[in-house]
Image (cartoon, rainbow, N blue to C red):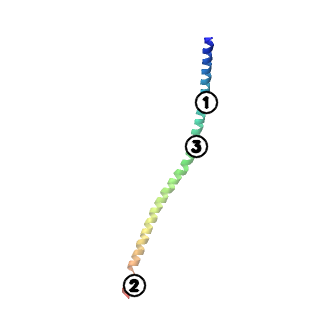
Amino acid sequence: MPEENGTGRLDRIERILDALAVKLAATNDEFDRMREEHDRDYKQLMAPQVLMQDNLRILVENQQHFDQRVDKLVSAIGEFIRSRPNPSSAA
């Protein structure tokens, strides 16, 4: 009888290990699927981000040129106003 109990225990342990191995394999498959999905999503997000960074760099460059032109315009208007005769001194 002791051999049957020992064999029964080993059978139970073997079934438990088999069940764990099956569950582990399923978990690994799910993990691999999630990683592939993450990699795909990451690649989909990277392309627009690169384009957005390029557009932002161009926008910053254009803003600097715009600021320079506005500064020149303000200076020109200031010079024009200062070069005009003062109406209060003419009276």
Of mark 3 and mark 2, the one earlier in the sequence is 3
Q: Which mark is residue 34?
A: none
What percent of the width, then of the height, locates residue 33? 60, 37
Marks 3/2: CA–CA distance: 72 Å
Question: 10 Å neighbourhood of mark 3: few (<14), some, or many (≥20)?
Answer: few
Which residue is depicted at the point 55% across and 45% down? 42
Image marks 3 and 1: residues in contact by CB distance under 8 Å: no
Question: Which residue is at the far left?
Answer: 89
Q: For the residue marked with disc 3, what is the amino acid?
A: Arg
**How many circles with numbers are drawn on the protein?**
3
Q: Which residue is mark 3?
A: 40
Marks 2/1: CA–CA distance: 93 Å
Question: 10 Å neighbourhood of mark 1: few (<14), some, or many (≥20)?
Answer: few
**Of 20 and 86, which appears nearest the observer?**
20
Question: 10 Å neighbourhood of mark 2: few (<14), some, or many (≥20)?
Answer: few
Q: For the residue marked with disc 1, what is the amino acid?
A: Lys
Q: Which residue is mark 2?
A: 87
- To which quarter of the image does residue 25 belong? top right
Q: Which residue is mark 1?
A: 23
Of mark 3 and mark 1, the one earlier in the sequence is 1
Q: Is residue 17 above or below residue 53?
A: above
Which residue is depicted at the point 59% across and 33% down? 27
Which residue is depicted at the point 40% across and 75% down? 78
Q: Is residue 68 above or below residue 9?
A: below
Of mark 2 and mark 1, the one earlier in the sequence is 1
- Quadrant where the N terminus sits is top right
What percent of the width, then of the height, locates residue 77? 42, 75
Name the front one of labels 3 and 1. Answer: 1
Question: Which residue is at the far top?
Answer: 1
What percent of the width, then of the height, locates residue 8? 63, 17
**Of 84 and 29, which appears nearest the observer?**
29
Q: For the residue marked with disc 2, what is the amino acid?
A: Pro
